[in-house]
Amino acid sequence: MSAHFVTALAASAEAASGQHYPHGALYIVATPIGNLADISLRAMHVLALSDMIACEDTRHTQTLLRAYGIDKSPGQLLALHQHNEAEASMSVIEQLRQGKRIAYVSDAGTPGISDPGARLVAAVREQRLRTIPLPGASSVTALLSVSGVIDSQSTGFVFCGFLPNKPAERDRAVQRLATETRTVVVLEAPHRVEALAAALSSLGTRAVTVGRELTKQFEEVATVAAQDLPAWFAQDANRLRGEFALVLHPLPAAPETAPDHRVLKLLLEQLPLKTAVKLAAEITGEPKNTLYQAALDLKPHKSD
């Protein structure tokens, strides 16, 4: 156990053990994306309590567990990753039917979000077995929180995960993003980030916030214009190291244009107000109530 977590496991038991943890349930457990201290007390307790832990990489997860002082035998760890998720899910379901508590963790962050786990959850829920989320670290929400683009007035964001690896497909994906007005979050691996930067540069002056090695010692967060991304990465070779999340800022809202009431104006010059409004609605398709108010604003008329 790491010296930093000598008391953490005991604290997790004290804080979380009084809660209910049903048998025969799958616990989806978020784990740190880099900084081990980002584990939740509840996550530590559930990992210690679980009869079995299904995981993306058994060696990686065993190292994580040992750092927290959680002792699990190799037989209590089940490899469940993108290449065997369907088959391994059946094994998990069988264990759940026996009343066992099973946790699932990916290598980092929240399972099922651009990580294995989604098909497992779908299979378990299809069998009407219980799934319980344990929220925690996520590179998506971590970077959004320091990008300054999501507030109570925003239209939300779009999560695209990893864009296609093939250049032509990636370029087409970026072309689609060019017309997406909302905030967009994408993820990328270090060996592909230069190619992604080159593709995103076609978005011109659109702002992009880059998050590199989030929560780790060499964390870096910077906002640059999309067209400047290749140059930004080229300035420092270290910027190509680590895992990446990128936030494309929303497109500025188009300025509202004043409604065109030329037809209404011409009709008002020749006809009574109500008649002009009725004809203008038939010609333009605008709502009568809107046109009536516009007519009152344009030209005072006596009611007819």
Image: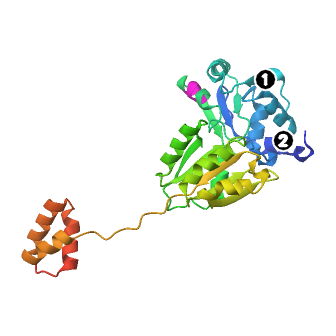
Location of residue 244 in the rendering, given as x and y in whole percent from the top left corner: 69, 47
Q: Nearer the viewer, residue 284 or 302?
A: 284
Q: Does residue 25 appear anywhere in the picture? A: yes
Location of residue 94 in the rendering, given as x and y in whole percent from the top left corner: 65, 17
Q: Nearer the viewer, mark 2 or mark 1?
A: 1
In this image, 9 relative to 113: left or right? Answer: right
Q: Tell me which residue sits at (53%, 46%) in the image.
A: 174
Q: Which mark is residue 161?
A: none
**Residue identified by numbered label 1:** 76
Magenta span: predominant SS is: helix
Quadrant assignment, res 232: bottom right
> Which residues fall within the magenta stretch?
121-125
Q: Nearer the viewer, residue 169 or 288?
A: 169
Q: Is residue 209 above or below residue 139?
A: below
Q: Tell me which residue sits at (80%, 20%) in the image.
A: 75
Tell me the kind of residue under disc 1: Gln
Tell me the kind of residue under disc 2: Leu
**Secondary element type, mark 1:** helix
**Residue identified by numbered label 2:** 9
Residue located farthest toward the right when viewing the structure as drawn: 3
Location of residue 73 in the rendering, given as x and y in whole percent from the top left corner: 84, 24
In this image, 281 relative to 18: left or right? Answer: left
Query: Is residue 292 within the magenta segment?
Result: no
Near mark 1 (Cα within 10 A), the count class, few <14, some 14-19 or many ≥20, is some
* N-terminal-most mark, 2 or 1: 2
Location of residue 261 in the rendering, given as x and y in whole percent from the top left corner: 22, 70
